Structures are given as structure tokens and as C-alpha cells.
Amino acid sequence: GWETRVKIVTKAPAARTAMTDTRLMMLRVVMGLIQVQKQKK
């Protein structure tokens, strides 16, 4: 179960996974900043 999933993820193109990871991180940072700004107001 878990091991097979890890193998599949590892076999996936590294470039594509890196792009999606960076995009998700950017989205998280942006959402976090928006929430902080809302709290300050």
C-alpha cells in the first residue's frame, strides 16, 4: 500500500512534482499573508 505509493511518486517526473510543490507553497504563503492582513484589520 504505502510503499507502492512512494514508488509511484518517486517514478513521477521530478520537474513536474517540483513545479506543483512550489506552486502549492506559493499558494499557502499567499493565503497565509491574506489571513494575517485580515486579522490586522
Image: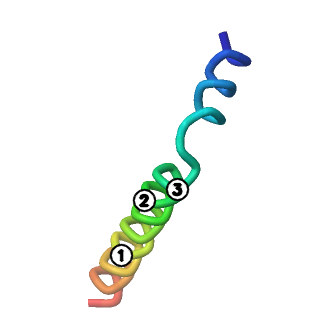
Residue beneath disc 2: 24
Q: Say what amino acid the circle numbered 3 marks.
A: Ala
Residue 23 percent coordinates (x, y): 40, 64
Residue beneath disc 3: 15
The quadrant of the image that shows the N terminus is top right
The quadrant of the image that shows the C terminus is bottom left
Q: Residue at x 44, y 73 (%)?
A: 29
Q: CA distance from mark 3 to mark 2?
A: 14 Å
Q: Nearer the viewer, mark 1 or mark 3?
A: 3
Q: Say what amino acid the circle numbered 1 marks.
A: Val
Q: Is residue 3 left or right of residue 19?
A: right
Q: CA distance from mark 1 to mark 3?
A: 23 Å
- Counting residues from the N terminus, which is met first, the one under dot 1 or under dot 2? 2
Q: Residue at x 68, y 25 (%)?
A: 7
Q: Which mark is residue 30?
A: 1
Image quadrant where residue 3 sits:
top right
